[in-house]
Image (cartoon, rainbow, N blue to C red):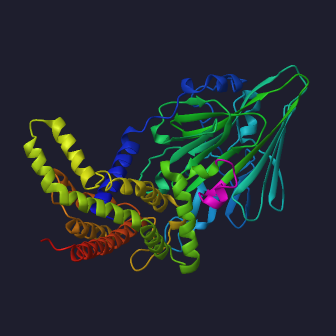
């Protein structure tokens, strides 16, 4: 790839990074929801409880029952009849083999995640009271009766899935009372401090409502907020792992975002509203508790969007499949990245060659363009006409060097997103000192090699006729890019380093090809006189 392509890639990524970090618009507020959605999902039952009333005291943290499948180990508490802990068996917190498994739900972070809370005071004992438990293979049922009310919570799961199917049944006493407040299922933590450089602390709340995806950073929330509409799911997690509440009930819940001293996160809020003659309600709610693995997420409508591949995700998913295809044969994601980079380079070589030839043609015309600029320096309109006539006479398209590069940009940005956000690279080793392609190079070797190779490529790029300011910027780009890449995943720096090396070879081949074609044309030209 020519240095100008990397300049375009660099500027695009830089603009995207700065925009997402400092200027991305906040998620739609309640007042911005469509009017139809408001009418269809108007809140029923009691209003939001007074601030802090749901989370004013931590829930009990005992683990009364443990179970596991091939994906996770899950613990339940008889107090509240709820999920209390979840550990992912296929992933550890660090590359050390004796480190703890990734804890997706942990009382040390919050006792409220995946709890089933009731806003009405007459139902408050069902939030943290003792339930009677009975268990079967891959299934546990909790039952509690109090004051003529019965709550049954049934959890079931399969052997090789991150999904936990949750069925709730609430039986109310026969009376004229129809409004029993809300059932609230939270996801979040007591306090959160996001760190974009640490994939396990890059926290986000993601909701899918009205067929629209919304991302929030929990520590960026300002106050309690209610989002109304056709709710599909709500997720809380980091770059690689997430807990998801998937609505499977006919009753449509609101999404409530909380920022309180004792809890920060979100929740699905179901209205407990009885119809005439009705004395029981049933709710179905699925928990997805695991890695943000595309093949698992794709089984739930809309859930694959939980992986943040940006605006070019339609390119990212096929690139991920290609990466996994190569991995099947080489069993090393570092080598798979190199093979994918080579494939992308080969596919785009015709465009790169066309761009290079166009830039060479423009370079040959530079003396004539400069002469026209000097001749018509006081007549800009005449200069533009004469310059266009010059391009037409020599069959040169001034945009010919840029358009092929712009076509490539979405693919390169999508590949950048894949390598920075895919669970497949989590703790995946390469060679030598690179033991985790999802974390930074501990010795900064690849970022430095990448910067040096970009500088070499830049020196190979003709700069005759270019604006001096642009030339300086292109020479500064490798230095700036090196510093940007220091703390980014090493898989990214391996990709850009290999891509730049291939770009140097391509540029050498293109230069040789153009020279040979020029020599053939010159030798075959008729002699004058």
Residue 227 x %, y %: 60, 31
Q: Does 385 lie within the magenta span?
A: no
Seen in the picture, residue 29 relative to 268 is either above or below; the reply is: above
Q: Is residue 300 visible?
A: yes
Residue 406 x %, y %: 38, 53
Instruction: Pick the quarter of the image with the C terminus.
Output: bottom left
**Image check: 299 left or right of 368?**
right
Q: Does 301 lie within the magenta span?
A: yes
Residue at the image point whose x is 84% and y is 31% from the top: 147
Seen in the picture, residue 67 relative to 218 is either above or below; the reply is: below
Residue 469 x %, y %: 16, 51
In front here: 199 or 190?
Answer: 199
Q: Quadrant of residue 416?
A: bottom left
Seen in the picture, residue 14 relative to 345 is either above or below; the reply is: above
The number of discs equals 0
Residue at the image point whose x is 83% and y is 21% from the top: 177
In front here: 55 or 271?
Answer: 271
Residue at the image point whose x is 22% and y is 69% from the top: 460
Magenta residues (range) = 289-302
**Image check: 365 left or right of 481?**
left
Q: Residue furthest front?
A: 529
Residue at the image point whose x is 51% and y is 77% from the top: 332
Q: Quadrant of residue 463?
A: bottom left
């Amino acid at each position: 790839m020519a240095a100008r392509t990397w300049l375009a890639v660099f500027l695009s990524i830089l603009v995207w990074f700065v925009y997402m970090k400092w200027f991305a618009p906040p998620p739609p507020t309640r007042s911005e929801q469509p009017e139809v959605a408001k009418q269809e999902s108007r809140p029923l039952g009691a209003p939001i409880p007074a601030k802090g009333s749901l989370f004013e005291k931590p829930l009990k943290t005992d683990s009364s029952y443990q179970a596991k499948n091939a994906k996770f180990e899950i613990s339940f508490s008889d107090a509240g009849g709820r999920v209390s802990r979840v550990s992912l068996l296929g992933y550890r917190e660090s590359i050390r083999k004796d480190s703890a498994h990734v804890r997706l739900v942990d009382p040390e972070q919050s006792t409220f995640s995946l709890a089933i809370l009731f806003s009405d005071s007459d139902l408050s004992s069902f939030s943290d009271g003792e339930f009677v438990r009975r268990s079967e293979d891959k299934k546990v049922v909790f039952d509690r009766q109090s004051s003529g009310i019965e709550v049954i919570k049934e959890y079931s799961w399969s052997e090789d899935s991150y999904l936990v199917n949750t069925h709730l049944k609430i039986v109310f006493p026969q009376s004229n009372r129809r409004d029993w407040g809300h059932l609230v299922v939270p996801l979040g933590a007591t306090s959160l401090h996001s760190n974009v450089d640490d994939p396990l602390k890059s926290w986000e709340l993601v909701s899918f409502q009205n067929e629209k995806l919304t991302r929030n950073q929990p520590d960026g929330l300002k106050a309690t907020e209610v989002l109304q509409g056709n709710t599909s799911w709500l997720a809380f997690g980091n770059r690689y792992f997430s807990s998801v509440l998937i609505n499977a009930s006919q009753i449509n819940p609101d999404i409530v975002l909380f920022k309180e001293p004792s809890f920060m996160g979100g929740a699905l809020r179901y209205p407990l509203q009885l119809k005439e003659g009705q004395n029981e309600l049933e709710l179905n709610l699925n928990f997805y508790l695991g890695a943000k693995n595309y093949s698992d997420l794709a089984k739930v409508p809309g859930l694959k969007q939980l992986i943040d591949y940006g605006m070019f995700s339609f390119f990212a998913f096929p690139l991920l499949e290609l990466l996994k295809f190569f991995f099947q044969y080489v069993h090393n994601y570092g080598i798979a990245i190199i093979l994918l980079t080579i494939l992308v380079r080969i596919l785009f070589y015709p465009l790169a060659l066309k761009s290079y030839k166009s830039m060479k043609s423009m370079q040959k015309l530079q003396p004539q363009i400069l002469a026209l600029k000097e001749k018509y320096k006081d007549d800009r309109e005449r200069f533009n006409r004469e310059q266009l006539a010059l391009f037409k006479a020599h069959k040169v398209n001034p945009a010919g060097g840029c358009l092929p590069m712009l076509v490539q940009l979405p693919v390169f940005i999508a590949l950048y997103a894949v390598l920075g956000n895919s669970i497949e690279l989590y703790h995946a080793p390469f060679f030598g000192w690179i033991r985790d392609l999802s974390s930074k190079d501990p010795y900064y070797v690849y970022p430095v090699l990448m910067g040096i190779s970009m500088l070499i490529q830049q020196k190979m790029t003709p700069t005759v006729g270019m604006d001096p300011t642009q030339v300086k910027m292109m020479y500064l780009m490798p230095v700036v890019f090196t510093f940007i890449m220091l703390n980014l995943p090493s898989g990214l720096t391996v990709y850009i380093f290999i891509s730049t090396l291939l770009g140097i070879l391509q540029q050498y081949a293109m230069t040789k090809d153009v020279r040979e074609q020029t020599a053939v044309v010159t030798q075959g030209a008729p002699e004058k006189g």
